[in-house]
Structure formats: C-alpha cells, structure tokens
Amino acid sequence: QAMALVNSPLSARAATVIAKDLHATEPEQFVVAVFLKLLSRAPTAEESRLCVEFLDRQSRASLVQALFNHAEFTTIR
C-alpha cells in the first residue's frame, strides 16, 4: 500500500492539487493547514519542526504525498 501511494500518478496529482489549494504562505502555516486537511488535527511541535525542515529540501506537494502514507491517513479507527 505504501509503495502504491508513493509511486502512483494519481496520488502525485492529488498531492499537487491539495498543495496548491492550501493558501498558506509560510511553511509553518502550510504544515498546520495540511495536517488539518489530511489528518484532522494540528501537528505536534516535533512534527511541525520536521515538516518545516522537509520543506527546506522538498516541495509542498512532496510533503502532502508523504502524509498520504501517515498511519493516521491510511488506517480506519
């Protein structure tokens, strides 16, 4: 499942659309917005820090796609 989400053209397109739809200008704002949209919660301080560091090296769409593989996104409780 994880490999399918990472390598899927559909998930890449969806990640790009979500990243563009979130109108947060600062990386910290974007991280909070994407967590709320995908996981229905705010990130912890550590998650926020790691995601902002990730955004220094990768695109916003890449972060969205990575969060598609988060356990809270892929499991039903």
Image: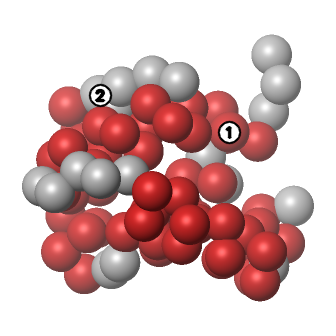
Image spot of residue 31 (x, y percent): 30, 47
Task: Name the outermost residue toward the top.
Answer: 77
Kind of element beneath mark 1: helix
- Quadrant placement of the C terminus: top right
- For label 1, the residue is 73
Residue 44 is labelled as: 2
Residue drawn where x is 61% and y is 46% of the image: 70
Q: Nearer the viewer, residue 12 or 18?
A: 18
- What amino acid is found at the position of numbered circle 1 in the picture? Phe
How did the renderer colour the structure? secondary structure
Task: Confirm or deny contact between disc 2 and disc 1 (CB under 8 A).
Answer: no
Where is 2 relative to 6, above or below? above
Image spot of residue 35 (x, y percent): 43, 38
Where is 73 relative to 3, above or below? above
Asked if one can make out residue 65 in the rendered structure from this viewpoint, the answer is: yes
Left or right: where does residue 31 sit relative to residue 28?
Answer: right
Asked if one can make out residue 3 in the rendered structure from this viewpoint, the answer is: no
Residue drawn where x is 64% and y is 54% of the image: 68
